[in-house]
Amino acid sequence: MSELTKPFTTTVKYIDLLSWDVKNYMPQSSEFNKKHPFVLFGSFLKKANISKVKIEDKVEYKILGVRSYGKGAYVNRVVMGKSLKMREYQQAKSDHLFWCKVDTKNGAFGIITKDLADGVASSNMTFAEIDTQKVDRKFLQILFTNKGVMQYLDSFVTGTTNRKYIRPDQLLNEIKIPLPSIKEQRRIVNAYNEKIELAKKLEEKVEYLDSEIEKYLFEELGLEQNKAETKNKGLQFIPFNEISEWGIDKIKTIGKNSISIFKSNPVSKFSIDVFRGKSPIYKEYSPSFMLNQKCNRWNFLDLTFAKNVDNKWFESIEEKFFTREGDILINSTGEGTIGRATYIKNEYQRLLYDSHMLLLRINKNILNPELFVELFNSSYGQNQVNDIKSAQATKQTELGVNNLLRIMMPIPDSLSFQDELVNKIRYHRLRLSDIKKQAEINRATAEQEFEKEIFGV
């Protein structure tokens, strides 16, 4: 039905009014696959009979939580009873649907499995008993991962910004979903899991090959690390040419727990320029954009996270700050993002980056920048980044220009040897990338086929 032919008013009998909410009386079923019955959640869920647990100080408890995007129920934390302010919790039961009464957006529903049934939940959480003769538990959990289903359920969400929820009685008595027969559900789940399991095996292969690349790199460089650190007492001497910055913690830690058959030098010895990114002036509608930490992954850039900035301001930035082929872009801050580095290829030229990122320009006659990125992203480089983080008195996760210049790198004298290493690693990276794409295709196909079963498109 086109927008022009849709009726402006809809008549609902008073006896059919369940709540004063317009969306409950819109034709919801038109969104879903017509071959499956469109039923209330209450047709396969019912209010749970949950017992209460009196908290004892000397007893250990598993406190359950639920993740968004259909990732399910999990043990949020394990604590002693004396640390809990609430003195009464709900005892979980297997084969129950579990969610938070005050936060049910983005598919935040989970199934209580047998291994979670010994956990407890606060009064903010709620349960509903699942009729496993009518709905397959795995089918139901996959349902909550589907973006279309999430959007559909979120259309029923009410509440303030931090408290968006679907009432338990509303879920059971007002919201409907398509429900194939139990036999069809299991067929759909098996087809879905078959592709997901294949994706997982391919992802494990990617992880293995990645570790093999690092192993090969370390062997070729004669690089050994994680040696037990010996603590020397009394007076110690450090060669003056190894001191890049004053401070005992700065002199004695970075790169000192690794050895190589090649001489190691701090980045300061072979860098040409290091730039901290600019603080942006954002503008929603603009042809210019800027990179941020989310854009910088492990040796590739994802420009979908870039943000638009004021074009006039963008054009005023000196040309030397923009990326060039052969540059290295490094995340300077952020838990989980600090230390990620990317080699700037030809297609990544003339990009600007924000102040949470650093651009390193090194002397290619001393060290191949692609080899630098491989080493920096490896456990060898990341251990040094972690050493720098842990040495911060303020506990701020900040790499910074000065700290970057202190990172130690083994440098083979022969550039042709460096190039040979890079070429071999590049070949294996391409193979690894192909396997990773196959895994992504299998995951995407599993989701698309499941969505087709639910929405018929």
Image: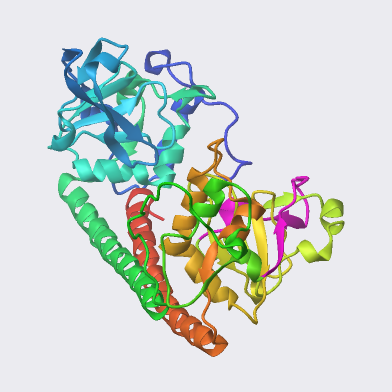
The quarter holding residue 328 reads bottom right
Left or right of 333 in this view: 83 = left
Residues 434 and 320: in front is 320
The answer to whether residue 304 of the structure is visible from this angle is no
**286 lies above or below 223:** above
The answer to whether residue 5 of the structure is visible from this angle is yes
Residue displayed at 49% across by 85% down: 423
Q: Quadrant of the N terminus?
A: top right
Percent coordinates x, y for residue 294 in the rendering: 56, 52
Left or right of 60 in this view: 342 = right
Residue displayed at 29% across by 17% down: 83
Percent coordinates x, y for residue 289 in the rendering: 72, 55
Left or right of 298 in this view: 319 = right
**227 lies above or below 222:** above
Q: Say whether residue 283 is magenta.
A: yes
Q: Say whether residue 79 is magenta.
A: no
Q: Quadrant of the C terminus?
A: bottom left
Percent coordinates x, y for residue 227 in the rendering: 34, 60
Q: How is the image coloured?
A: rainbow
The quarter holding residue 68 reads top left
**262 lies above or below 38:** below
Percent coordinates x, y for residue 418 in the rendering: 52, 83
**165 lies above or below 428:** above
Residue farthest along the bottom direction in this orientation: 416
Query: Total number of numbered labels?
Result: 0
Left or right of 351 in this view: 444 = left
Residues 389 and 234: in front is 234
Q: Which residues are magenta?
A: 271-297
